[in-house]
Every structure is written in structure tokens, then in C-alpha cells.
Image (cartoon, grey):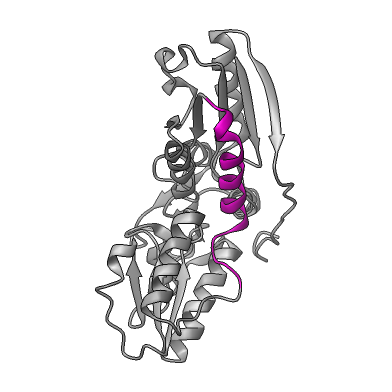
Amino acid sequence: MKILLAKPRGFCAGVDRAIICVERALERYGPPIYVLNDIVHNKAVVDDLREKGAVFVKQLDGVPAGSHLLFSAHGVGPDRWEEAKHLNLEIIDATCPLVEKVHIEARRFAGKDFTVILIGEQGHDETVGTMGWAPEHIKLIISKGDIDGLDVTDENKVVYITQTTLSVEECQEIIDALKERFPNIQGPPKADICYATSNRQAAVRALVPQADLVLVVGDSESANSTRLSEIAAEYGKASYLISSAEYIHDEWLEDVETIVLTSGASVPENLVQEVIGRLRAHGPCQIEESELVHEDVHFRLPAEVG
């Protein structure tokens, strides 16, 4: 059996930065460090940080005054900032800089009284946070089917922004449809879908034609991990999104000669290596790493933990 190991895969710079923020905060201030929502959408990462002293919360009313509170990589709206300050919490903002870029775009265009069309997933942490910065101006759409129902005040003052972890090709189809409906629509100076999402999707597209089976390591709550599995399925390949090696079924591997293995941007490399170990236990494996794009991106840490 041959395993084609996609590269780049796993942690992006924003996820790496967020995890380091929690670890540094625990070292500098001691536990507990409170984290609003999951720091990233990966249960293994969250469980590891919880063991080290992080406390993950959905609401702030139970966080003791004066505690250190960390905002996750997905970002939050201004209401969360105001609530945290009202409760006298010490804020550490681990919002991914690429998500912050989308927040800035939303505020800038809303300030010019544009209708801001956000392409994203209903209820996703990142989408909720972005909408919070311009709630009276943002309209969320999920698919091309939502476009006909859009009602805007001025068709000459419309702009689109996107969630950073969408399918590149599906998002472009929606953007093209928006341009048909609103010929004067504007977009961000640089695409909002992050480099890591784009690179991981491109790597899968490059390798999947060679595969009999595609395994994507990642959680179902992770948008970018889900996209990778969906892309493989588009090619008519058997594709499974698994959170760890224990979810692999032997029947998936029957008569399989080549497996493409990758992981989402919130997945630690040890989970990928455990999958390789599981496949090796099934039978002899030849490992071949295929690097499509070299990544060397790093983001500065917040001053509170830098």
C-alpha cells in the first residue's frame, strides 16, 4: 500500500499562534486561563489544553472577575469585548490576523454605508464574530441559492467578504453569481480565504486523482477539514473525515493500493502519525510525502503573552 502524504497539511500559522497563546498564558499567569469557545476546532487540542489548566467556556457570566480570558482564533464581535471589560477580565486576543482582516473590512465598508454580503456558514464561530462588527449592514449567504432573495438599499454600494475557511472553488462560484446580480459589487483587495485553506485544498486536488482512498484527519466541526473531505468526494473517490486513527475501518482498506492522507489546519501532526501507524499495522506501507507549496508563515504573538 502506498500512502501519499499531502504537504502542506495540519496546523496553520493562526492555529499555531492561538495554541501558543494559551500555553504562554498558562506559564505566565498560571491556571486557570479561561478561553471563550474552543480555541480551535479540534477536540484533541482542546482536551490537551484543558489538562494543562485551560477552562473553556461558552458564556462569560461564570468567569471570576480579574481572570485572564482568551478569545479564540475564530474571533468575536464587539459585544464580547464589552462584556469582558465590564466583568473586569484581562483579555488576551488570539484572533487569527487573517480573521481580523475580515473584521476590519466589515467595519470599513459598513462605515461607508455599504451592504456587506458575508459568504459563510450559519452559526460558525468565525461568522458569528464577523457579523457582530456590523450587524445592521451584513447579510449572510451560504449558497448561490440565497442570492436571488437579497434585498439591498443601493446596488451601487454592495461589497462581499468571506469566511476564511470555505471551499475556494465553491466560494468563487458564489462570487461570480453575486457579480451577475450586482455588476458594481466590490470585493476585498485580497481574497479572504486564508492561504492555509487554499494550499491544503490545492494539495488534495493535485493528489486525489492518484488515490483509491482519501483520509482526512480532522474534526467534523472544523470547516476547513470538512472541505478537504468534500473535495475528494467531488472526484468520485472514497473519502472519510476521521478525528483519529481509531475511527479507521478495516473494510475501507480492502483492495486499496494508494491512500492520500492529509489533515485540516487545526490538527496536530501526532494524529496524522498515529493514522500512519494504524495503516502500517494493517500491512506494509510505502510513505511518499508530496509538497505542493512550501509554507513559512508566522504571526506575532499578542503583547500579553509575547
In the rendered image, which quarter contains the C terminus?
A: bottom right
- Residue 131 relative to residue 100: left or right: left
Foreground residue among 73 and 273:
273
26 displayed left or right of 83: right
Considering only vertical position in the picture, is 125 above or below 138?
above
User: Looking at the rendering, which quadrant does residue 170 occupy?
Assistant: bottom left
Instruction: Point out the image quarter for the N terminus.
Output: top right
Region rendered in magenta: 190-211
The spot of residue 17 in percent (x, y) is 63, 53
Q: Where's residue 77, x and y in %? A: 42, 71
- Is 81 situated above or below 215? below
Question: Camera-side residue: 175 or 249?
Answer: 175
- Report whether residue 83 is seen: no
Count of marks placed on residues: 0
Figure check: 103 above or below 93: below
Q: Position of residue 264 (x, y in %)?
A: 53, 42
x 61%, y 42%: residue: 203
Q: Position of residue 103 (x, y in %)?
A: 50, 73
> Looking at the magenta stretch, what is its main secondary structure?
helix
Q: Residue at x 69, y 60 (%)?
A: 299
Q: Is residue 257 visible?
A: yes
Magenta-span inclusion, residue 37: no
Name the foreground residue: 231 vs 18.
Answer: 231
| Residue in the image at 60% along x and 35% along y | 207
Quadrant housing residue 273: top right
